[in-house]
Amino acid sequence: MTDPDDSAADRRHDRLDRTPTGGPHNSLWGWTRARHPLRVAINYLAVWLIRVSPSLRVKNWLLRRLGATVESGVAIGLEATPDVFWPDLVTLETDAIVGYDATLLCHEFLQDEYRTGEVVIGERAMVGAGAVVLPGVEVGADATVAANSLVADDVPPETTVAGVPARPVDGGVGERRGQE
């Protein structure tokens, strides 16, 4: 019997680009070969401004300058962190919300390789405070990620997930709509 959780993880992993790294150390030691240091420095400064600026317009403008896709009405909370190495792999669809201190990671440095993958936060989706979204994850339209969750698999539209790792919980958007 196939575990449905395995197929969700497989979809995310299938979307990741893998780059093997050689040498005596783990892949993070070779980060300068993965991304030019000047590019990372510029990204870091822009991401720092995105994190501390109270202006949603400034946050969205800066993120677009870094190559991210940021549609209209996107709200990024204070201290929220888009990926510093690959912000161009972030997509925030119309009216998406990324909460306070949430992190959108588009890369992961491992022992013998690094991986990159797009993170997509769907239309009207919400990522709660302190949540971490891993590379290659798609959060569907009208989905909700609870605060402090670790999102390692795709989140279907109109679904609420919570926990470490994040799993669907009762009372999601779709269930609430059925009660109206």
Image (spheres, grey):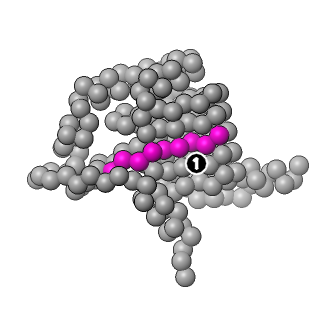
Tell me where residue 129 appears, x and y as whole percent. Answer: 56, 38
Q: Is residue 40 left or right of residue 6?
A: left
Tell me where residue 117 appears, x and y as whole percent. Answer: 41, 48
Amino acid type, label 1: Val
Q: Residue furthest right?
A: 180
Q: Residue furthest bottom?
A: 1
- Which residues make up the magenta segment? 115-123
Q: Is residue 100 left or right of residue 160?
A: left
Which residue is found at the position 52% from the left and 38% from the top?
91
Q: Is residue 81 magenta?
A: no
Q: Is residue 25 above or below residue 121?
A: below
Tell me where residue 131 appears, x and y as whole percent. Answer: 52, 43
Which residue is found at the position 45% from the left and 45% from the top?
118
Tell me where residue 106 appears, x and y as whole percent. Answer: 41, 43
Q: Is residue 100 visible?
A: no
Q: Is residue 101 above or below residue 133?
A: above
Q: Which residue in the structure is indicated by mark 1?
A: 139
Quarter placement of the N terminus: bottom right
